[in-house]
Image: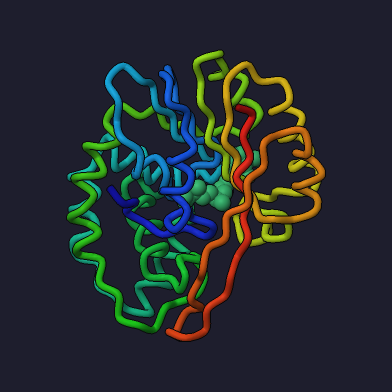
Amino acid sequence: MESFIGWIGGKRALRRAILERFPDDEVGRYIEVFGGAAWVLFAKEKKANQLEVYNDINGNLVNLFRCVKYHCGELQRELEWMLTSREQFFDCLTQYQARGLTDIQRAARFFYAVKISFGCDNRTYATSSKQIDNAVEYMTKVQERIRGVNIENKDFADLIKVYDRPTALFYLDPPYVDTEKYYDSPFCAQDHQRLREVLGHIKGRFILSYNDHPLVRELYADYRIEEVTRTSTLAGSGNNQTQYAELIIRNF
Ligand SMILES: C[S@@+](CC[C@H](N)C(=O)[O-])C[C@H]1O[C@@H](n2cnc3c(N)ncnc32)[C@H](O)[C@@H]1O
């Protein structure tokens, strides 16, 4: 199935290439460390007896996932009367960051802001008239899919420490090198280094996606690196196609 939101750096286009690289043998626990919109988790088959974990450091995003999981009906009702308008968009942007809202009210405003913003950047009003009704209805299916998923709100290093086992499979999709500023939570050069150090000591297996950048190739030179290229059509133009080189890195 598809995710219910778009997200900057979301792996909608790459999800099949990533799933094709999953191990054939049994995975006891699957952990999506930099969850975002969780495009790989939603594309992945749900397996009996397999623990699944979604994590992100962004508290508003995690609150949205938790509200879909535990209060889907209430969240859908909160969104029922939200109409697509510029005023409502900017009200939502201010309100979800303010104090005093319930988790459900905050999740509704955050969801609305992500859905309505241009390129899901959560900042710019998209002038094309987007409707959110179908997305709100689709939340029921999302709730069913994430029913057994553990939802965490930790820094990647803490999360990996908690869930690491020899039977674990981690999928990691960190902010790409030089694109860190697009996310609300800061991620810097030391964090790329810190991630490499943590991954150097894990007991489980990992699949890591990154942009094809010299720093990434240098940090992961000892691992299995595969290059994948995808064609991206720039917004607003059917002809303006760009090739993006990305890397899929594995320790198995
Ligand atoms: C490239 S996006 C992930 C996209 C996701 N794979 C998808 O398909 O939508 C990177 C995510 O990492 C999160 N993030 C940034 N710093 C983090 C940290 N220190 N620990 C955990 N998550 C972090 C961001 O909030 C962002 O949602």
Q: Is residue 27 above or below residue 144?
A: above
Q: Nearest the camera: 111 or 93? A: 111
Q: Is residue 79 above or below residue 30?
A: below
Left/right placement of residue 204 relative to residue 134 reads right
- Residue 144 visible from this viewpoint: yes
Q: Residue at 38% across / 46% down in the picture?
A: 64
| Residue 186 position in % (x across, y down) | 69, 50
Q: Nearest the camera: 10 or 116? A: 10
| Residue 9 position in % (x across, y down) | 54, 57
Q: Is residue 211 above or below residue 200?
A: below
| Residue 61 position in % (x across, y down) | 45, 47
Q: Residue at 52% across / 40% down in the picture?
A: 56
Quarter of the rendering containing residue 148: top left
Q: Nearest the camera: 50 or 163? A: 50
Q: Residue at 47% across / 48% down in the picture?
A: 17
Left/right placement of residue 144 relative to residue 89 reads left
Q: Residue at 43% across / 84% down in the picture?
A: 238
* Colour scheme employed for the rendering of this structure: rainbow
Left/right placement of residue 159 relative to residue 99 reads right
| Residue 200 position in % (x across, y down) | 73, 25
Q: Nearest the camera: 26 or 71? A: 26
Q: Quadrant of the C terminus?
A: top right
Left/right placement of residue 217 relative to residue 167 reads right
Which residue appears farthest toward the top when viewing the image?
Answer: 166
